[in-house]
Image: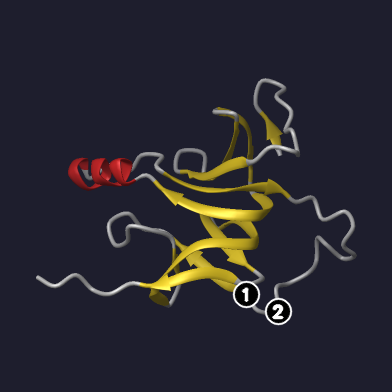
């Protein structure tokens, strides 16, 4: 991770991570400050959060802003063998699009809104952000709004 202003992550406190559209990587915040930028980060005890006010601003202005975060604790994987080469056997792709959804969703099953996960890997791939969950995620079914 590329540190910002020599800031150090306190592993006992949660991080807020978001896709940085300008840098094409993930920005990592702690205590309200950006502490780093990275192409890959793993988090545990994860919560997916969307600011509805920020989302409404995107819809009104048709211009994206930072309003959706993946929040959790840094997972360094040092106790896990083959950490850097492992693949998720039950990989779940999680997506968010403010123009389509009001919350994070399971890709290819966008009626499933995701609220929490035990573990996620946020990765940059071909200039785009990717969120992968390996373990159970907590979700709920959403229903289309009637016109």
The residue depicted at 43 percent of the width and 60 percent of the height is: 104
Q: Is residue 117 visible?
A: yes
Are there few (<14), some (14-19), or many (20+) residues within 10 Å of tag 1?
some
The answer to whether 85 appears left or right of 25 in the picture is right
Image position, residue 66 (x, y; %) = 41, 39
User: Where's the C terminus, which quadrant?
Assistant: bottom left
Image quadrant occupied by the N terminus: top right
User: Residue placed at 56% from the left, 41% from the top?
Assistant: 16
- In the image, 14 versus 61, the foreground residue is 14
Task: Specify the farthest residue to the top.
Answer: 5
User: Percent from the top left, x then y, of residue 22?
Assistant: 46, 38
- In the rendered view, how is the structure colored? secondary structure
Q: What is the tally of numbered marks visible in this picture?
A: 2
What residue is rendered at 29% in x and 41% in y?
A: 53
Query: Mark 1 sits on what residue?
Result: 91
Q: Which residue is mark 2?
A: 89
Q: Are marks 2 and 1 in contact (CB under 8 Å)?
A: yes
Q: Distance from label 2 to label 1 (Cα)?
A: 6 Å
Query: Is residue 26 visible from the viewing direction of this image?
Result: no
In the image, is residue 13 above or below residue 147?
above
> In the image shown, does 16 or 12 lie closer to the viewer?
12
On screen, residue 32 above or below 85: above
């Amino acid at each position: 991770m590329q540190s910002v202003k020599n800031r150090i992550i306190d592993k006992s406190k949660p991080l807020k991570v978001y896709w940085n559209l300008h840098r094409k990587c993930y920005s990592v915040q702690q205590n309200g400050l950006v502490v780093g930028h990275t192409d890959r980060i793993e988090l545990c005890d994860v919560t997916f959060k969307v600011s509805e006010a920020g989302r409404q601003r995107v819809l009104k202005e048709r211009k994206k802003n930072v309003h959706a975060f993946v929040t959790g604790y840094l997972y360094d994987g040092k106790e896990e063998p083959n950490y850097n080469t492992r693949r998720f056997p039950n990989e779940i792709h999680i997506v968010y699009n403010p123009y389509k959804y009001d919350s994070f969703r399971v890709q290819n099953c966008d009626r499933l809104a995701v609220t929490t996960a035990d573990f996620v890997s946020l990765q940059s791939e071909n200039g785009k952000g990717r969120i992968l969950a390996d373990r159970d995620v907590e979700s709920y079914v959403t229903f289309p709004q009637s016109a």
